[in-house]
Image: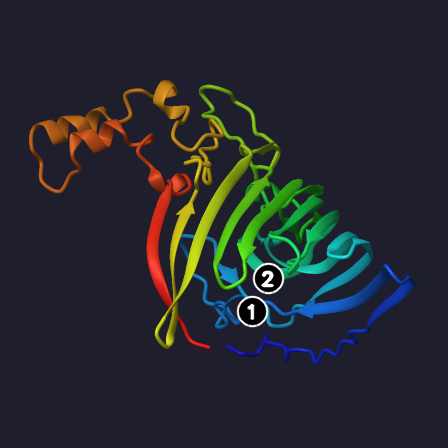
Amino acid sequence: MDRNLADTEVKQYLSPRVSISYPITAQSVIRFSYGHFFQNGSLSSLYKNDNFYVTNVGSTPTFGNANVDMQRSIQYELGMQQQLAGNLKLEVTGYYKDVRDYIYTQTVFTNTGREYKVLTNLAYSNVRGVSFRLERRRSKEDLFYGTLDYTFQIAEGNRTEPEDELFFSEASGKQTETYLVPLDFDRSHVLNITFGLYQTNNWTFGLIYNLTSGAPYTPAYSPSVVPITFEQSSDNKRIQHNLDFKFEKFFTLGDFDWSVFLWVSNVLDIQNELTVYASTGRSLSTGEETSNPTQFNSVGRRIARGDPGLMDSSELANYYSGRPENVSRPRELRLGFSLIFN
């Protein structure tokens, strides 16, 4: 059984890194960093089905590959810090990350027409962007502090969908042509704002606001409605934003310092759409409601006659719209106290 197995190669990697910081003036600093970073795949993926067991019928077998190379990431970063006032700082940073030998499960068709999946280093991705940060630090002379962060970023990688179009053919010795698409975590615009007022050992008031572009997703319609296949990650979810608030008052009672606080999450009670249906790009509605309005008729009849083990009819009516797990949590208020040990 082991006659066709080969030993895993011993691999050695060099990971050079350099970081330079140089003060241009007494109020400004420029910095640069460069480095090679390596990351191994998870052990569960490297050694998956390590006995290479294949059933004669059923699903396509998937094999790990302990001989894959480690993922290699080359990262560049160039930034500048500028003091604008005694407690006010501006920071600008540009960065680029190039990931090669990305570990990915590849479909292979053999000369005999058999199909299997195996771990390879065929994928590639890159991330590039620029960020701006304006920070006003706490000072004893005033009550106000805050930060403003904005990042513009593009994250792309080899497409991984549709799987039936991505394969290597042993007969032709050719690999399916691929191209770059937005990665799942790609966010073109990210804005974070913090604002605070405070009086030392007396009270604090703070606001945190964040806004992000919607993540990519792949539209998909029923073939009976639109018989086409969309490119992977060719559309985006809706913009997401959120505001949190906290007020805390400090007291001294005997030998103890303590405080009471009011913490409000999602002050504006915004319903951000986290998971969306591919046919609509929305969290609580889907195209199947109109393209296939009779899809639940059979289940509805079973519920109506009282068959055991089925949901309530009201849940069936709200099968798509009653999905709280698809959206962000509603407004939440917390009132509490804390003991402070110095």
Q: Nearer the viewer, residue 184 or 238?
A: 238
In the picture of the structure, the residue carrying the numbered disc 1 is 46
In the picture of the structure, the residue carrying the numbered disc 2 is 119
Q: Nearer the viewer, residue 161 or 190?
A: 190
Residue 302: image quadrant is: top left
- Measure the C-alpha gap from mark 1 to mark 2: 7 Å
Q: Amino acid at mark 2?
A: Leu
- Residue found at x 70% / y 81%: 10
Q: Which of pointers 1 and 2 lies earlier in the amino acid sequence?
A: 1
Q: Nearer the viewer, residue 329 or 129?
A: 329
182 relative position to 27: left or right: left
Give the residue furthest to the left. Answer: 306
Instruction: Tell me the element at label 2.
Output: strand
Mark 2 crowd level (few <14, some 14–19, many ≥20, 10 Å Cα):
many
Mark 1 crowd level (few <14, some 14–19, many ≥20, 10 Å Cα):
many
x, y percent for residue 125 = 70, 52
9 relative position to 242: left or right: right
- Residue found at x 55% / y 68%: 42
Q: Amino acid at mark 1?
A: Leu
Q: How many callouts does the rendering have?
A: 2
- Residue found at x 75% / y 79%: 12
Q: Pointers 1 and 2 in contact (CB under 8 A)?
A: yes
For residue 313, say whether it is visible: yes
x, y percent for residue 222 = 45, 25
- Residue found at x 79% / y 53%: 85
